[in-house]
Amino acid sequence: MTSKTWAGNFFEDFTVGQVIEHATPRTVTEGDRALYGAIYPTRFAVPSSAAFAASVGLRQHPVEDLIAFHIAFGKTVPDISLNAVANLGYAECRFHQPVVPGDTLATRSEVIGLKQNSNGRSGVVYVRSTATNQRGEVALEWARWVMVHKRDADAPAPETVIPTLAPAVAAEDLVLPTGLDFSSYDFAAAGEPHRLGDYEVGEKIDHVDGVTLTDAEHMMATRLWQNTAKVHFNTEARPDGNRLVYGGHVISLARALSFNGLANAQIIGAINAGSHVAPAFGGDTVYAWSEVLDQAELTPSVGALRLRLVATKGRDESMTLRDEEDRYTAGVLLDLDYWAFIPR
Amino acid sequence: MTSKTWAGNFFEDFTVGQVIEHATPRTVTEGDRALYGAIYPTRFAVPSSAAFAASVGLRQHPVEDLIAFHIAFGKTVPDISLNAVANLGYAECRFHQPVVPGDTLATRSEVIGLKQNSNGRSGVVYVRSTATNQRGEVALEWARWVMVHKRDADAPAPETVIPTLAPAVAAEDLVLPTGLDFSSYDFAAAGEPHRLGDYEVGEKIDHVDGVTLTDAEHMMATRLWQNTAKVHFNTEARPDGNRLVYGGHVISLARALSFNGLANAQIIGAINAGSHVAPAFGGDTVYAWSEVLDQAELTPSVGALRLRLVATKGRDESMTLRDEEDRYTAGVLLDLDYWAFIPR
Amino acid sequence: MTSKTWAGNFFEDFTVGQVIEHATPRTVTEGDRALYGAIYPTRFAVPSSAAFAASVGLRQHPVEDLIAFHIAFGKTVPDISLNAVANLGYAECRFHQPVVPGDTLATRSEVIGLKQNSNGRSGVVYVRSTATNQRGEVALEWARWVMVHKRDADAPAPETVIPTLAPAVAAEDLVLPTGLDFSSYDFAAAGEPHRLGDYEVGEKIDHVDGVTLTDAEHMMATRLWQNTAKVHFNTEARPDGNRLVYGGHVISLARALSFNGLANAQIIGAINAGSHVAPAFGGDTVYAWSEVLDQAELTPSVGALRLRLVATKGRDESMTLRDEEDRYTAGVLLDLDYWAFIPR
């Protein structure tokens, strides 16, 4: 009679080239759309309105892109990061097609790199994960690296393999949703008049509004994605007795706050990089600002903005990301680099 | 490079006759029905049961009328009341047809009145708002007046225009949902035996039950309606550090509590008037009582009750609305006047 | 003019043989599935994935069995247990068919036993309740007994009738969902490799994870089931100012936690017995462990495990249910005995 419960993988359980099929497939529903809208102050017209989505050429009404990201990501947690010390970064995340209610997502990961830490007690695991729908089509893919505890500090170190990951997804590698056409885009309905050409590289936008976190809300969101990391739910799991807010909760909150100034950055095409700079807890008030990093023209009606999205604890009207020694300034929670589709 | 974010309209930005098309259209789903039922203790049989709705002649299964009201209302907040001092009143709110999952609601408003306050720092804006579905049909309409800050106290006062608004929607102006027929109404399934004729004008009903508010719940509700007023979400937005509960949250809570005694007042036909008498906060325990103000016979099977719905902080078994000097008694949060359809 | 509000039945209002048709019929939706997943950390593959459900022979995508149980149970509260002192037990609960979105559930109860307490101020009411769908088919049925206050201590005692209830549903009385076939079961997708034969009678499984309760979450769940017992919602309803957590909330939480070790115990076939041993409140951290009580082979691909599911406040790695004097050990919240279907 062996133990029936799963304690997660430790660093020495991973090998380069290993493929993991993650449990549990998950069907997306209109209930997910409603809950996302209850938990995050999102107002982007495409996921808000079936009529608006149809008016820009989409055959079905997609949910928020980050719903797909969180569900696909959540599946990897029991196998990849249950024993994680820290989630170190993301790269090369591309959304291949919008996810609609009725789609069932499953995720598989391949280990693409390993590096034991010099202290011998943990190591960095690099994985490339792919989420597919019930037709076997890729919905999204991403790379991620995470620091994981060793079960046994005496276990031998694996050969170090560090994968080459692009600093950003190239604009020409972005996948446009089938049918997407912004030529009849209704700017009044969408909420703002700004087109691709109205944004300048280097421009910063203070999104003004703040939201004070509650434990009930971040737990509900995190459970919805079937993310099982105990620190999010159990006050006995951390010495300070606080529930750590899932980093993806801050991503979704900041993205929703960015509507005010980026209302037309409707659909996320890629996540280039992301750092959870500091932990967030219930009671923190989260604000966001953005910086335009790049732009691209994709079709006659569709462009893309590459944006840095910064979440802060407390409002930082100065929008300072780093201090003179290149350290993140106090209060920065999240530094996310992504591409979004916007009308030209 | 101009500011991309939206700070809302100030009093001097409004002109009589001005028409505003509000962002963002919003599709109603079964997820909204479920969340409404999770946040409010509603048990009205029509929105609870598709089978019951069909049994009273409705072709599709409508959601709670107040879901439509809150969504339609929420759209007006960024343009009308982001800089509001106070939401002063409602009038002439008529529900033209039940909203069903799949309907996409959009709202437009016309400014119908303006009156600068004598202090010169704010003024009252009167708007008539209309929510339409994806077929362009009117779902509901209402008038509302709100006190709004001036951006610049030195801006000239507009000509005063005060619209004439009816003290109540006349019974003959109520719009019955297409097909509504209570002749085979199942009183046991609905939960109470009381028909139109069982209520007397002047009768008061203590709805007995109370609900203690939490911040997570009122924020989730308010976000669901895409209401962006920062005082509801951000503890740094008010000097007292409390999140102000959206007035509509108290309306929905009181309406749900009123099931106990008004279970057959199934469908709201109109809101005649409404005052948010005092603010509510997390931790407050809200109770409700009703007074029958009027009644009407509409078809051989359908009648209407005109009801005063009063929400109080703490239970008031005496059901006293006003003191000897005609001021609202302490504890009154909401004084709402509405029509509901009920079997004859 | 009589009172319009409903104060619930008292002990002397019940008679053996009495049949009560409970209000309000309730249609299950995809919104319920999403909310259940937001409130409980469930990952069972059948309710999580429409594709997985189809792969095991189910024509439609059922919701969690406990959604049906809570909705059906909630309907009985206003009539049976609004004036309850305590919910004493369950027996003979059988699930006749999975509930799918679109099903409308209604519940009727028959009083099958009465026993006044020796103190003359309360008594035990035994009911058998049956939930049917919109086609009149039985979805589930169960017996329950509850201690109810008398309105008038001087009311005469009824004849004592104590029904004979089976200590457990016999394996041959379990109703398999139509079409259920585990012969192509995907263990990797489901999350664990363990089959019926991998579990031994007497084996105990520590489910490891804990969840700290919040008031917002348990209230939202309890409202979703239209359960109206005021102690769950109103801090003024109990002398200690706490909201009592609905016992069913602990059942669902423990069942979801049991995924870790019982991931393939996909579908609940019956609840044999259940005791809410101690109250739970916001702030408590709930853990779960299970004991295998029995097993059965039902079809060539489907077996059943009879399981004791124990929820505790604080983790009890010793998995001790009772002390030397056969009393429940401190910390035990729930002792539930049920059958679940699992691949052979």
Image: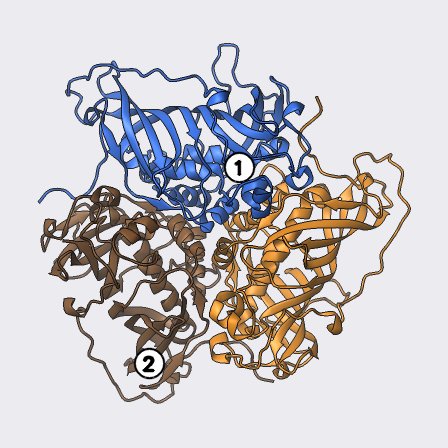
Chain colours: A brown, B blue, C orange
**Left or right: B123 with respect to B259?**
left
Task: Answer yes or no: is residue C250 visible.
Answer: no
Q: Residue at x 25, y 21 (%)?
A: B122
Q: Position of residue A146 (x, y in %)?
A: 31, 73
Kind of residue at disc 2: Glu
Q: Is residue B101 visible?
A: yes
**Image: C64 above or below C180:** above
Q: Quadrant of residue A71?
A: bottom left
Which amino acid, by three-letter code, is at mark 1?
Answer: Gly
Q: Secondary structure at mark 1?
A: loop
Spatial separation of the CA atoms under disc 1 and disc 2: 58 Å
Residue B35, given in percent of the width and then of the height, sits at 48, 48
Q: Residues within 10 Å of mark 2 (few under 14, many from 20)?
A: some
Residue closest to the far top = B325
- Above/below status of C45 relative to C88: below
Label 2 lies in what chain?
Answer: A
Q: Which residue is mark 2?
A: A110
Res. A143 image quadrant: bottom left
Residue position marked by numbered label 1 in the rendering: B179
Position of the C terminus of chain C, as image quadrant, is bottom right
Q: Is residue B199 left or right of residue B94?
A: right
Can you say whether C119 is above or below C195 in the image? above
Nearest to viewer (mark 1 / mark 2)? 1
